[in-house]
Image: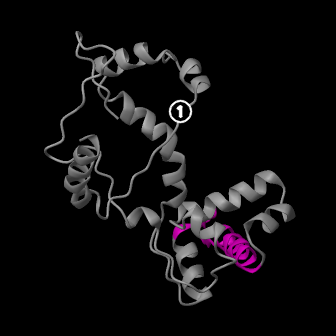
């Protein structure tokens, strides 16, 4: 009987799950205690009932660093001149006399070319830490994604579409419309719900 119920439930869920990406994260007990959250499961459930946005906040703690790495513009450069034009338009500075200076853009272009040639890890070995991170920041500031830089040596001439453009995060639409939140068997009187 249990298997039959499971098959029926899966039959209803499969159409919803088709083409849906599930991102799960783990928050360690150390993070919870350091940031003032209870590490006791029942206290955490109670806090989640009091603060319905708690799980969403913790999800962002786990995934924002990953998703931030993948942010950036559509990268489809046909030539180095096109990259240099982008860098010059975004990284131009002006001297005291008002003349445009493209030193920062030229340095960013040299850094980009080196990353494309030997890769980001090898390039990091050639720079001191501060200069390296300043150069990376210059490229990120113009919209080049960190994931693009990390894969540039492997795919120097390929088109790169930022991953975050390929899916849409719908935090308010996490379950099928007919889904019913299960009632916890450990606290049937208080009606605590386990919601993920």
Residue at point 58% right, 64% down?
Answer: 147
- Please give the residue where the numbered disc 1 appears in the rendered image: 27
Q: Residue 72, position in %: x, y?
A: 48, 64
**Left/right of residue 36 with respect to residue 177 in the rendered view:** right
Q: Is residue 101 a member of the stretch shown in magenta? A: yes
Asked if 14 appears above or below 41 in the picture, the reply is below
Q: Nearer the viewer, residue 20 or 3?
A: 3
Q: Residues within 10 Å of mark 1 (few under 14, many from 20)?
A: few
Q: Residue 184, position in %: x, y?
A: 30, 22
Residue at point 18% right, 41% down?
Answer: 179
Q: Residue 176, position in %: x, y?
A: 20, 48
**Left/right of residue 149 with respect to residue 60 in the rendered view:** right
Q: Quadrant of residue 95?
A: bottom right
Q: Nearer the viewer, residue 104 or 156?
A: 156
Q: Nearer the viewer, residue 72 or 155?
A: 155
**Left/right of residue 153 with respect to residue 1 in the rendered view:** right
Q: Work out which quarter of the rendered image holds the C terminus and state it.
A: top left
Inspect this view and state whether residue 98 appears. no
Q: Residue 159, position in %: x, y?
A: 51, 82
Q: Work out which quarter of the rendered image holds the N terminus and state it.
A: top left
Residue at point 81% right, 67% down?
Answer: 122
Asked if 36 appears above or below 141 in the picture, the reply is above
Mark 1 residue element: loop
Q: Is residue 108 a member of the stretch shown in magenta? A: yes
Residue segment shown in magenta: 90-117
Inspect this view and state whether residue 194 appears. yes
Residue at the farthest left position: 178
């Amino acid at each position: 009987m249990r298997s039959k119920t499971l098959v029926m439930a899966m039959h209803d869920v499969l159409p919803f799950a088709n083409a849906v990406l599930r991102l799960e994260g783990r928050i360690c007990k150390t993070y919870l205690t350091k940031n003032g959250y209870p590490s006791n499961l029942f206290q955490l459930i109670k806090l989640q009932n009091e603060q319905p946005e708690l799980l969403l906040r913790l999800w962002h703690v786990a995934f924002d660093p990953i998703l931030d790495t993948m942010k950036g513009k559509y990268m489809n450069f046909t030539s180095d001149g096109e990259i240099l034009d982008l860098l010059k338009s975004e990284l131009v500075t002006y001297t005291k006399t008002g003349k445009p200076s493209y030193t920062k853009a030229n340095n960013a272009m040299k850094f980009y070319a080196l990353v494309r040639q030997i890769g980001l890890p090898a390039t990091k070995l050639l720079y001191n830490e501060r200069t390296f991170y300043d150069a990376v920041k210059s490229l990120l500031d113009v919209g080049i994604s960190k994931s693009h830089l990390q894969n540039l040596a492997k795919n120097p001439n390929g088109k790169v579409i930022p991953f975050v453009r390929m899916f849409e995060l719908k935090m308010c639409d996490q379950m099928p419309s007919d889904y019913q939140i299960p009632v916890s068997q450990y606290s049937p009187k208080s009606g605590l719900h386990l919601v993920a």
